[in-house]
Amino acid sequence: MTPLERAWRGGRGDFRLHLLSIFSVSVAFVCMAAALLVVVNVQSLRDVWAKSGRASVYLRREASRAAGAEIEQALRSTPKVKSVRYVSTEDARREVLDGRTDAILSQLPADAFPASIEVTLEDDASASRVKALSDMLSALPEVESVETYQSWTERLASLLKAGVTASALLAAVVLAAVVSVVASTIRLTLQRRRIEVEVMKLVGATDEYVRRPFIIEGAVQGAIGSLLAIGLVGALFLIVQSRFDSELGVLIGMTPRFLPWYAAVAMVATGAVLGALAAYGSLRRLLLV
């Protein structure tokens, strides 16, 4: 009888114990997958904003339309500038109030919404190029301020760094939990099959022969547990994505993204390897190899 056949027969005999182990492993991997999902989306958002190359040039209230037109014309002839759009105070007020019934906003005069020039740079424009353009525009007397959204990118980078650190710590906890659960399950399984193992050793079976099906069972527990975790997180992701506001996606420049396929495969492989190692470690002590 091959190790796979013996593992299948043993798994059927202790299926309740294995189901409990798989459930515990799934709970641990759900936490890890959720943390990775947050990190992936924050990374995507940071990349989108870092490459957006956008700038909002807010003009002073006393700046004339002619002055704004001169700045607009100068920007159009500037290298790496893709598009330039002048937004008057009336246009700005209309865009803010579009579809909204807020009484306070609707009572604000047009002067409360400053005129601006929306600038979009080419995708290959460097951050230094955006900053240089911002400094040049800020020095103009007609310009009140320039918003390049670089500060938000830096905040997202800081948040991403903290998220990666937290995910690494959570991953360590998950790995320890998986090893502990699978090792405990294999030890209990071995105790329940003690008579069978002793008979096999009496007839000449080696420790390696005895150990193989248990290692396969541990690997299967880890792989199935991680796969179920990815499936559960994927179902929750689809629910969130179906309720995600498309206008918000346009505003931030992206929609939620699920884990890349290689991350999902790596999680399943990690679960299988951890399960196998946990089973091997527990059996190594119990069989006194």
Image: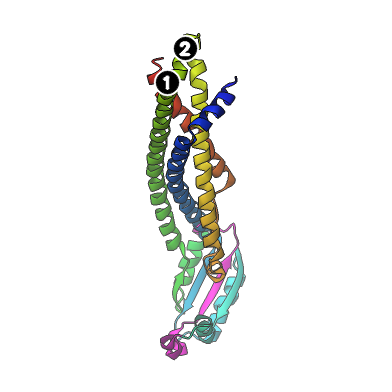
Asked whether 161 or 146 is in front, the reply is 161
The residue that appears at 45% across and 59% down in the rendered structure is 153
Picture coordinates of residue 22 (x, y %)? 47, 39
The residue that appears at 49% across and 51% down in the rendered structure is 37
**Which quarter shows the N terminus?**
top right
- Residue bearing the label numbered 1: 194
Picture coordinates of residue 144 (x, y %)? 43, 77
Callout 1: SS:
helix
Q: Is residue 239 above or below residue 117?
A: above
Magenta span includes 253: no
- The span from disc 2 to disc 1 (Cα, nearest Å) is 11 Å
Picture coordinates of residue 34 (x, y %)? 46, 51
At label 1, the amino acid type is Arg
- Residue bearing the label numbered 2: 201
Q: Give the extent of the magenta segment.
A: 102-128
> In the rendered image, which quarter is residue 265 located in?
top right
Callout 2: SS:
helix
**Which quarter shows the C terminus?**
top left
Q: Is residue 50 above or below residue 54?
A: above
Dot 2: within a 10 Å radius of its alpha carbon, few (fewer than 14), some, or many (20 or more) residues?
some
At label 2, the amino acid type is Lys
